[in-house]
Amino acid sequence: MYLKCAPILLLLVVVMFAQPVQAMGNNCKGSLLVTSDAADMFEEYKNNVKVFMSLKIQVANSLLTCADEIWIEAVDNNKIKFRGPINKNAKLKDAQFKKIKAKRGIFKIDLDERITQMWMQLTHYTLFPSGDYDSIIKVSIIMDGDVVEEEFLTMEYFSSPKISLSLDNNSQGKVSGSNGEYQIDLGELTTNARFDWGIKVLSNSAYDIVLDSEFNGLRHETNLDAVIAYSISFDNVKIPSTEQLSRSYDFAASVKNTWFGFSFTLGNVELMPAGSYQDNLSLTIYPR
């Protein structure tokens, strides 16, 4: 009798053990919300440029109590790649900006909270070329290696046109000022005196440059009718101070650091009233 009953008891134990697991699998359902808020995106400019995009994953309590992992993966690549004017691979960081490693193209994170904050990081050695960048990722909620919920999200980054202007090394000793406002002391004014200097323009987009004299020459500080004309040479184009210079610079999606040379040549200063003369010369760059 004992030998005949043993298999029946063993079978009952297996059935009773399997029932709760199956029931839990059927009940492991709930809402999943995956967002990337552009308002949380920020950039860092140091030796290179870093862009951090928020990735927030929210699950219902029912998922939190039964699922155990979050999986994040690219839709069409083993690496998360943003496509745009240039293509860049992204890194996934946790809430403390620590790198999360991928295993066979999948980032796996423990599901411990209803809201899991992460960051997607793009890095470039200089400014990102102006334009739109995007990447599609899949976010899955996992229980015991099986997918119970998943969402697809398009993450987007817009690199706005940016311009940086600075003096070249040879001009820093003879031109004072900073942040786009510079002063040049021409000293004693003599006929045909010349002054040369240069600037560097770092841009991630095409741009227009407009060069204009406020007083159409060097104007006397008190005798406003006394004006000394001069000529301007900019990027191998020469104009008198009475005219405005407009130039357009187009280039493919990239970043360029371009040097431009200035040259001022005074006109005739003979018989001009003694005193100080000044002009405000504006160089305006319009990114496109």
Image: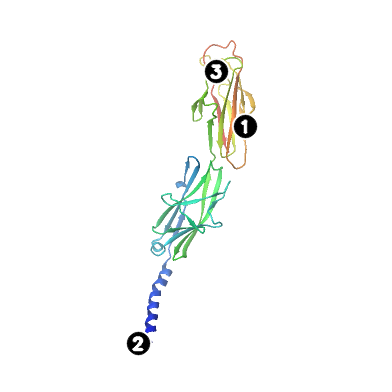
Nearest to the observer: residue 136 or residue 39: 136
Q: Secondary structure at mark 1?
A: strand
Assess disc 1: are there few (<14), some (14-19) or many (≥20) residues with their C-alpha within 10 Å of its C-alpha: few
Q: Give, as a three-letter code, the residue at label 1.
A: Arg
Give the vertical position of 20 relative to 179 (above or below): below
What residue is rendered at 49% in x and 45% in y? 51
- Front residue of 37/70: it is 70
Discs 2/3, front: 2
Q: Which residue is mark 3?
A: 219
Identify residue for label 1: 247
Q: Quadrant of the C terminus?
A: top right
- Tag 2: Cα neighbours inside 10 Å, few (<14), some, or many (≥20)? few
Q: Could you tell me the amino acid type at mark 3?
A: Arg
Label 3 or label 1, whichever comes before in sequence order: 3
Which sits in the foreground, 7 or 25?
7
Which residue is rendered at x = 46% and y = 63% of the image?
149
Q: CA distance from mark 2 to mark 3?
A: 119 Å
Distance between mark 3 and mark 1 Cα atoms: 26 Å
- Which quarter shows the N terminus? bottom left
Residue 21 image point, x, y percent: 40, 71
Q: Nearer the viewer, mark 1 or mark 2?
A: 2
Residue at 64 percent of width and 27 percent of height = 237
What is the x, y in percent for residue 69? 43, 61
- Outermost residue on the front side: it is 3
Q: Earlier in the sequence, mark 1 or mark 2?
A: 2
Q: Which residue is mark 2?
A: 2
How much space separates mark 1 and mark 2, taking CA atoms? 101 Å
